[in-house]
Amino acid sequence: MNVAQSHSIRRSVIASLALTGVIVAMVVGPVAANSAVYQPDGRIRQPCPERGDCTIEWFGNNIYNTTAAGQKSEYGDYLCDCDRPVVFRISIQNDGTANDRIRVLGTGRTAGYKVRFFRGTTDITSAIKAGTYRTPWLAPGDTFVIKAKTSVAEDPVRLARLVTLTSVSDPAKQDAVKFVREWIVCGC
């Protein structure tokens, strides 16, 4: 609400009370500045094969940067399991002090792998790649989980995706996580 709207509401209330004979004493001053803090927090889990067990630990909690330092998950494909889809889970948390929406952008290099992003069973890949996907409004402390499902497209080499989270209310506040999947030559 801006100052003009605030003063308009005050005048309406005073006029309504005056009509009822109520005496109103009011101190009119500037509206206090918004002191809300906005901060998205990205966290990522170690990946799991689509039908396998997943770790429950999130990496990157309360670490804020746009390079994904300390917020990266890597998975190595060996000859015996490279054809299975692998799912990376990304948690988007509102670490701010006010409700906020978080914009999600996924960028990076893919060589031999295919990536699809999901919220539940809804495919949100095109919006994530375009940077137009937004979470619903999240209260402070609320989380929102999306999945990045990776599969082999052809002759896998390396997949690296940076997922950047930006506060809609304060675009200067960002965080990022990264997931990597690559072919590892082994003697298995």
Image (tube, rainbow, N blue to C red):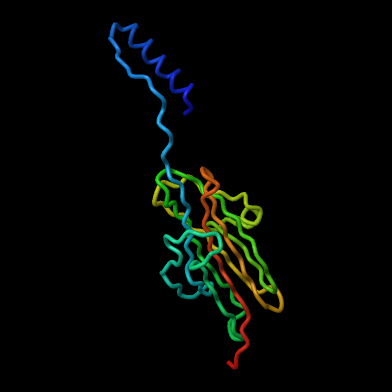
Residue, x 43% and y 66% (percent of image)?
A: 58
Residue, x 38% and y 22% (percent of image)?
A: 29
In the image, is 108 to the left or to the right of 37?
right
Quarter of the image where one finds residue 10: top left
Quarter of the image where one finds residue 123: bottom right
- Residue sitting at the far front: 29
Query: Which of the two residues, 85 or 35, is positioned nearer the viewer here?
Result: 35
Residue, x 53% and y 75% (percent of image)?
A: 49
- Residue sitting at the far right: 154
How many numbered dots are placed on residues in this image?
0
Location of the C terminus by quadrant is bottom right
Residue 186 to residue 130: above or below: below
Residue 169 image point, x, y percent: 51, 43
Residue 180 image point, x, y percent: 58, 72
Residue 46 image point, x, y percent: 48, 72
Residue, x 61% and y 80% (percent of image)?
A: 82
Residue 24 to residue 108: above or below: above
Residue 138 to residue 115: above or below: above
Residue 161 image point, x, y percent: 61, 66
Residue 31 to residue 15: above or below: below
Quarter of the image where one finds residue 36: top left
